[in-house]
Amino acid sequence: MTKVFFSVAMSLDGFVGPVDPDREKWMEQWMKLQGWQGEQKFFRENLHIGEGGETGVDNDVVKETFERTGVTIMGKRMFDGGETGWPEEAPFHTPVFVVTHRERELWERPGGTTFYFVNDGIESALKQARDVADGRDIRIGGGGQTLIQYLNAGLVDEFTITLVPVLLGEGIRLFERLDTDRIDLVGSDARHSPRVTHLKYTVGSG
C-alpha cells in the first residue's frame, strides 16, 4: 500500500531550514544541516558529484528514502530555490508535483524528472501523485510550510527526522504551526551514526 511520508534534517534547536536573506549566510547554515548527505556514496552517485563516499547507516537511509519514492510533492518556495540550484538532471528521477498559485506548463528534465504545477491545493496534488506513484510511496519534499499543511490535514502516514548535531539559532521551525491535538506519534525506528541520528515515527489521529 502506498504511504505518504517525509524525511527532513533538523538542527538540535529545532530548525529545518535557514531564512537569512544573505545568500552566503544561508548557504553556510544549509550546509550545516545537509552536509552529512554530501558524504554519502549513494547521494554522490545520484547527483553525479564524484566517486567514493561513505557506505554506512547514513548512506543506507539516503538510499532507502530514494528507492521507496515513486513521486514527490513540494511547495513553490522549495521549487523556486531548486530550479536554479539543481543540476540539469534534477535529483528526483520521478514525477514531482509543485503546489503553487502560479500557472505553468510542465517542465521535463533529463533523467526522468518531470515537474507538474498544481493550482488547486494540497489534496489535489496528492490525488494526482497517487495516480502515478506506481505502487511506490509519495514523499512530501518540503518546504516546512508544505509539510505542516499535510500533517495538519491528516495526510501523512510516517516521517523521519534526521537530527543533526548543530545549533542554528534561527530559521524555519518544522512544528511551529502544528495542530498537536489532531496528531499522535509512535516511534517506529531509530538509527544512529557518528554524524546524525535518524528518528522514524508513524502518524495517527489525535
Image (cartoon, rainbow, N blue to C red):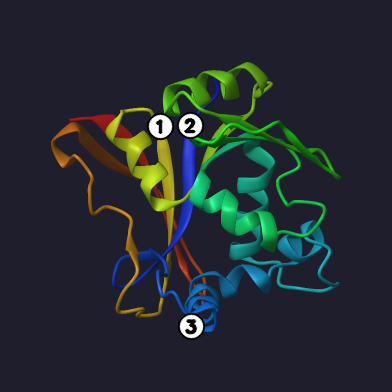
Dot 3 or dot 2: first in sequence order is 2
Are the residues flagged by discs 2 and 1 in contact, CB closer than 8 Å?
yes
In screen coordinates, is 177 left or right of 114?
A: left
Query: Label 2: which residue?
Result: 4
Query: Label 1: which residue?
Result: 157
**Residue 157 at x, y = what percent?**
40, 32
Give the number of the mark in front: 1 or 3. 3
Amino acid bearing label 2: Val
* Residue located 59% across and 63% down the image: 57
Amino acid bearing label 1: Asp
Q: Quick one: 194 or 126, which is closer to the camera?
A: 126
In screen coordinates, is 168 left or right of 40?
A: left
Q: Measure the C-alpha gap from mark 2 to mark 1.
A: 5 Å
Give the number of the mark in front: 3 or 2. 3
Q: Measure the C-alpha gap from mark 3 to mark 2.
A: 33 Å
Query: Label 3: which residue?
Result: 25
* Residue located 62% across and 67% down the image: 37
Is residue 103 positioned above or below 109 on the image? above
Is residue 95 positioned above or below 146 on the image? above
